[in-house]
Image: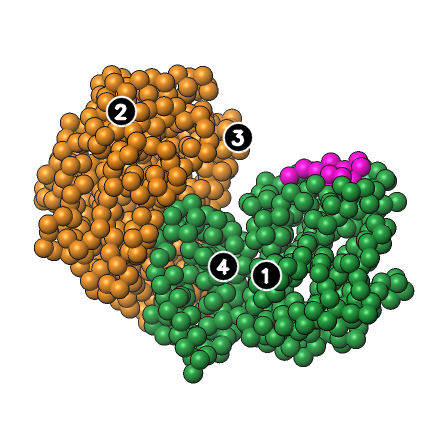
Chain colours: A orange, B green
């Protein structure tokens, strides 16, 4: 960095305006916060947080940062599970939150939005016209984050594809300040070279995506289904069968293992088989009849796979309670008087789902490390081959102890992913999963990423530290 | 020493409650003060307080954030969906109490005089106490006392006592009660309910004012209170110490519905208007009174009620709650007028000619927003009492 902090603030205020650049402690701390169970520390803070209004201002900020070799961390909504938006080298945190327009073009059958638009807001606006956002992340996250990570969550990607399959075009500011456009305004996407595919999923290290154009998808009709099984492992077998039998895939195939169900059934007053694990899904169709037919087909499949009980969820009250068992599982730890929590992700291939479930169900038992001192339970997007295990610990653990536990858990997650030959399927590859990436794909693959980064960002200003695996 | 311990327990409470945040950011989607910055939203406020407690730094930036909350509580509703279910409204109010009492960095500069006025003159504007009942001059409204017993005490509230727009509510409600033959009266020495003092963190002043009011209720042997102010209504029903003693408290929308249903009040004149209704936060979301105002509106002959995009529990705040009536948000924070303008845009989208509400605060701020948007020709803001008064004939 070749400029002092006073000049940095003055120069950036000249670009984005006095009221859109902040260097006070409250703002710097909030923009350094990540979804992690430990606190922001002094070294994590950016020097300044800026909120450019548009692509041109972002270009000017990046030109300035590149000239003075100032690290720039991109902030969409701060909901990265990977520490992606946590500054590692101070510098500038550039928020894309003001780029939040949403414009729907039904005639062209696409919508455009600024990357700062929240997925919840996009879902709402699309829903008004009967369209569906094929990105199922938490609704507080930004479209820019989801597209940068190329994530959807749940089973949506098996049906509608990942963002890379739904994005028609992008507007991008390169780290050196140039603005480029990719893709098409027609529904016919480019074959061959299309830089869209380079930037979607690049986790924000090659350029700042400022605008996204995505294809419109009609809102499907939904009918929910539940299945109760004696063990979670039986649900794993049922999923393999669901694919083999070519049952129409539901939008999501979620599950909660026995421990979570025991708590949830009691908490929400659900009349369900004692000791069971639960599978719950939203079956979809173009029409209500088609969704109902698909739901009945899934019930038949679950029953044939050994479900103690399976039925279409016609009753709204019961449906809401059962979804609460799945979606509010984090409350279980709190009910046990535990406050800190962190989840891990394991994506085994279908034939090994049950094996991985058995291992994860008992993962914290009999261990001598900090993981052994935690309370855990298993849940996840089993229909999409995605298992999560959440670990809780008491409120009185120190920040350092929580940090150490998280390191142990990340190491455990890496080992499990390698063992089960899975991928990091929900949250991204860098920075914290870099050890997994290097081991899974080898040094040559990692070198390619580093060379691409060098090509696009010669001074390594953008999200510095993420490609290096710094946390 | 006792006060010190109490503040330590507030600090402990805040530390534990804020640690429970799962950082999902869903609250930002519904927070009325959110413009685009995550720091300017329920999550931002929550984190600002959390890290200030960690670093023991309590400065004006923190104060500005914490006092920018409208206490609308919409964030709590989405937090419940996630599982954390943080009592965010209580957290922010405790944070204000902590900043004001223990750290002496609260309230906002403009609110210092307001709190002093409440203490000395019994109303936030510092108007003379003897002018509190001036709006009622010539209307023949009895002053309730032990010797002049009334069946119903109309608790007017500060805004309806002193503000010109608010006084319209007081006059219309009195006209309606008279027409229904209700034996009602007002208190000569009514003082502020203290609701807004509590929202600003001045819990001691709230206790002082509530004791003064309760004493007057007792002296006048009041058994039944009706108010047009959802803020006072909330404090009486949720925060006043006398609740357990069987004092019946109603918002006028509840009471007037009963009067109509019993045939004591007849709305005979047609009012051919398309209207929409804005749920005041402290009547709707916090007191769960959603249907009484709507039922009342629909009893007016000729009125067509249409709902806004966000209604009932999902209603949006007008921007004036939580003490924001008396603060000018510092640079970088969303103004109350901007919040109200968003709500007016929702109302305009319904095609309604009239935006009805049932709170003097909402009435003032939504009226101002209609003016600032230059939409006075297409939309009028009224309290429900105004349309009822017309329908009385």
Q: Closest to the observer: A137 or A115?
A: A137
Chain of the residue that carries numbered disc 1 in the rendered image: B
The residue that disc 2 covers is A307
Give the foreground label among 1 and 3. 1
Eye-nearest disc, 4 or 2: 2
Q: Distance between the residues labelled 2 and 3?
A: 38 Å
In the rendering, which numbered label is found on residue A129? Answer: 3
Within-10-Å neighbours for mark 3: few <14, some 14–19, many 20+: few
* Mark 4 neighbour density, 10 Å: few (under 14) some (14–19) many (20 or more): many
User: In front: mark 4 or mark 1?
Assistant: 1
Magenta-colored span: B297-307
Q: Mark 4 points at which residue?
A: B89
Local secondary structure at mark 4: helix
Whether the residues at callouts 2 and 1 have beta carbons within 8 Å, the answer is no
Does residue B391 appear to the left or right of A158 in the view shown? right
- Residue B244 shows which numbered tag? 1
Q: Are marks 1 and 3 in contact (CB under 8 Å)?
A: no
Residue B298 colored in magenta in the image? yes
Say which quarter of the image contains residue A355. top left
Question: Alpha-carbon distance for marks 4 and 1?
Answer: 24 Å
């Amino acid at each position: 960095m070749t400029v002092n902090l006073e000049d940095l603030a003055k120069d950036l205020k000249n670009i984005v305006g006095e009221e859109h650049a902040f260097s006070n402690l409250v703002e710097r701390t909030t923009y350094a916060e990540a979804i992690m169970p430990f606190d922001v520390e002094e070294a994590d803070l950016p020097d300044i947080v800026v909120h450019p209004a548009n692509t041109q201002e972002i270009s000017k900020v990046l030109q300035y940062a590149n000239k003075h070799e100032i690290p720039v961390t991109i902030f969409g909504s701060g909901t990265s599970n990977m520490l992606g938006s946590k500054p590692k080298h101070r510098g500038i945190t550039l928020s894309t939150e003001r780029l939040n327009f949403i414009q729907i073009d039904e005639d062209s059958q696409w919508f455009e939005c600024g990357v700062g638009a929240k997925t919840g807001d996009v879902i709402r606006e699309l829903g008004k016209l009967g369209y569906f956002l094929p990105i199922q992340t938490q609704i507080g996250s930004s479209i820019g984050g989801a597209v940068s990570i190329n994530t959807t969550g749940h089973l949506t990607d098996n049906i509608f594809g990942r963002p890379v399959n739904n994005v028609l075009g992008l507007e991008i500011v390169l780290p050196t300040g140039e603005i480029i456009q990719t893709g098409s305004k027609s529904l016919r996407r480019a074959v061959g070279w299309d830089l869209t595919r380079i930037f979607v999923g690049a986790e924000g290290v090659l350029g700042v995506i400022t605008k996204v154009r995505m294809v419109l998808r009609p809102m499907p009709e939904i009918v929910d289904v539940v299945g109760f099984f004696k063990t979670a492992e039986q649900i794993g077998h049922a999923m393999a069968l669901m694919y083999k039998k070519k049952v129409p895939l539901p939008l999501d195939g979620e599950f909660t293992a026995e421990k979570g169900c025991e708590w949830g059934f009691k908490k929400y007053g659900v009349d369900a088989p004692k000791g069971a694990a639960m599978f719950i899904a939203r079956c979809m169709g173009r029409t209500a009849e088609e969704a109902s037919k698909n739901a009945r087909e899934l019930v038949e499949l679950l029953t044939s796979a050994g479900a103690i009980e399976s039925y279409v969820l016609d009753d709204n009250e019961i449906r809401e309670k059962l979804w609460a068992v799945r979606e509010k599982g984090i409350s279980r730890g709190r009910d046990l008087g535990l406050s800190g929590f962190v989840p891990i992700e394991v994506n085994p291939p279908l034939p090994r789902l049950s094996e991985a479930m058995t291992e994860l169900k008992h993962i914290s038992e009999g261990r001598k490390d900090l993981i052994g001192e935690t309370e855990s339970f298993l849940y996840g997007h089993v229909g999409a081959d995605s298992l999560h295990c959440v670990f809780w610990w008491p409120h009185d653990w120190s920040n350092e102890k929580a940090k150490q536990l998280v390191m142990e858990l990340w190491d455990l997650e890496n080992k499990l992913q390698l063992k089960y030959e899975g991928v990091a399927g929900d949250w991204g590859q860098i920075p914290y999963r870099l050890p997994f990436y290097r081991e899974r794909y080898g040094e040559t693959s990692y070198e390619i990423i580093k060379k691409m980064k060098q090509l696009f960002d010669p001074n390594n200003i953008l999200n510095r530290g993420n490609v290096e695996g710094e946390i | 020493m006792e006060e010190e311990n109490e503040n330590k327990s507030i600090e402990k409470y805040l530390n534990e409650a804020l640690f429970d945040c799962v950082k999902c950011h869903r609250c930002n989607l519904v927070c009325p003060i959110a413009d685009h910055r995550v720091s300017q939203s329920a999550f931002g406020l929550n984190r600002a307080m959390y890290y200030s407690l960690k670093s023991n730094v309590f400065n004006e930036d923190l104060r500005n954030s914490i006092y920018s909350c409208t206490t609308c509580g919409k964030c709590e509703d989405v937090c419940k969906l996630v599982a954390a279910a943080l009592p965010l409204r209580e957290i922010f109010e405790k944070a204000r109490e902590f900043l004001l009492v223990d750290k002496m960095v609260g309230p906002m500069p403009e609110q210092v005089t307001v709190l002093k006025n409440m203490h000395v003159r019994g109303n936030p504007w510092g108007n003379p106490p003897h002018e509190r009942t001036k709006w009622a001059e010539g209307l023949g409204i009895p002053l309730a006392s032990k010797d002049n017993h009334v069946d119903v005490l109309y608790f007017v509230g500060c805004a309806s006592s002193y503000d010109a727009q608010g006084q319209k509510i007081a006059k219309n409600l009195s006209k309606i009660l008279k027409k229904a033959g209700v034996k009602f009266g007002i208190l000569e020495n009514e003082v502020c309910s203290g609701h807004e003092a509590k929202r600003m963190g001045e819990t001691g002043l709230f206790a002082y004012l509530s004791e003064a009011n309760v004493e007057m209720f007792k002296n006048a042997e009041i058994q039944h209170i009706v108010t047009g102010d959802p803020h006072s209504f909330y404090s009486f029903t949720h925060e006043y110490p006398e609740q357990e003693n069987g004092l019946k408290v109603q918002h006028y929308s509840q009471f007037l519905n009963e009067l109509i249903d019993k045939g004591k009040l007849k709305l005979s004149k047609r009012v051919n208007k398309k209207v929409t209704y804005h749920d005041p936060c402290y009547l709707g979301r916090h007191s769960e009174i959603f249907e009484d105002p709507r039922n009342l509106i629909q009893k007016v002959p000729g009125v067509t009620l249409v709902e806004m995009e966000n209604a009932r529990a999902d209603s949006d705040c007008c921007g004036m709650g939580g003490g924001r009536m008396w603060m000018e948000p510092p640079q970088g924070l969303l103004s109350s007028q901007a919040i109200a303008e968003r709500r007016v845009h929702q109302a305009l989208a319904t095609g309604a000619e009239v935006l009805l509400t049932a709170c003097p605060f909402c009435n003032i701020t939504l009226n101002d927003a209609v003016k600032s948007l230059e939409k006075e020709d297409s939309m009028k803001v009224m309290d429900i009492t105004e349309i009822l008064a017309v329908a009385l004939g």
